[in-house]
Every structure is written in C-alpha cells, then in structure tokens.
C-alpha cells in the first residue's frame, strides 16, 4: 500500500511517499489511515482538513483499502 504525500503532509512526514505494506496490520479503511497518521505524526491532527484519494478518486472515511491501492494525502491548500 503506497501513500503519496503532498504539501505540508510531505513536510510533516519528511518524505513524499510511505509504504504501509510492511506494517504488521496496515489500515483497512481511509478512517483507520487517518487515525494512523495522526497517531504516528501528531502534526496531522492540527490540520484544518485532510483529503484522501484512493486510486485517483476522493474517498470518505468508510472506503476500504486494499494492498495494491495508491493513496494520496492532500492537505488544505492556501493561495496567494
């Protein structure tokens, strides 16, 4: 399960991608993934919003995750 990180999410993790397939129990839903991120990187809990895309489609917390999914973490964006 590959997770791509953008914007401030990339800064929080310190990398543009993460491989969660090596975890003993990878997240099985988008909601579990968000919980994992907030637990592992508390700065995620401070973001005003956090969008998740699974296989290039925005996904709600209840969406199930599969081993081969490509997941993108899309933090809030500000313009200037």
Image (cartoon, rainbow, N blue to C red):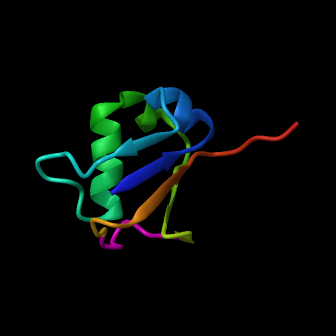
Does 32 sit above or below residue 54? above
Relative to the observer, which residue lies in front, 34 or 49?
34
Relative to the observer, which residue lies in front, 64 or 56?
56
Rendered residue at 70%/44% (across/down): 77
Residue lying at the far right in this picture: please name it.
Answer: 80
- Image quadrant in which the N terminus is located: bottom left
Does 38 sit above or below residue 11? below
Q: Which residues are magenta?
A: 58-64
Q: For residue 46: magenta? A: no
Rendered residue at 36%/31% (across/down): 41
Would you say the magenta stretch is mainly helix, strand or loop?
A: loop
- Image quadrant in which the C terminus is located: top right
| Residue 32: quarter of image | bottom left
Does 24 sit above or below residue 70? above
Measured from the top left, where is residue 25 in percent x and y?
13, 52
User: In the rendered view, does 10 fall on the left or right side of 29?
Assistant: right
Does 7 sit above or below residue 67? above
Relative to the observer, which residue lies in front, 13 or 21?
21
Q: What number of labels is visible? A: 0
User: In the rendered view, does 54 fall on the left or right side of 78?
Assistant: left
Rendered residue at 75%/41% (across/down): 78
Rendered residue at 21%/54% (across/down): 26
Measured from the top left, where is residue 4 in percent x and y?
50, 49
């Amino acid at each position: 399960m590959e997770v791509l990180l953008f914007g401030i999410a990339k800064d929080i993790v310190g990398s543009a991608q993460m491989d969660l397939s090596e975890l003993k129990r990878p997240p099985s839903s988008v909601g579990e993934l968000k919980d994992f991120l907030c637990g592992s990187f508390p700065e995620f809990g401070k973001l005003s919003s956090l969008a998740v895309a699974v296989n290039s489609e925005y996904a709600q917390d209840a969406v199930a995750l599969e081993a081969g999914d490509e997941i993108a973490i899309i933090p809030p964006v500000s313009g200037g």
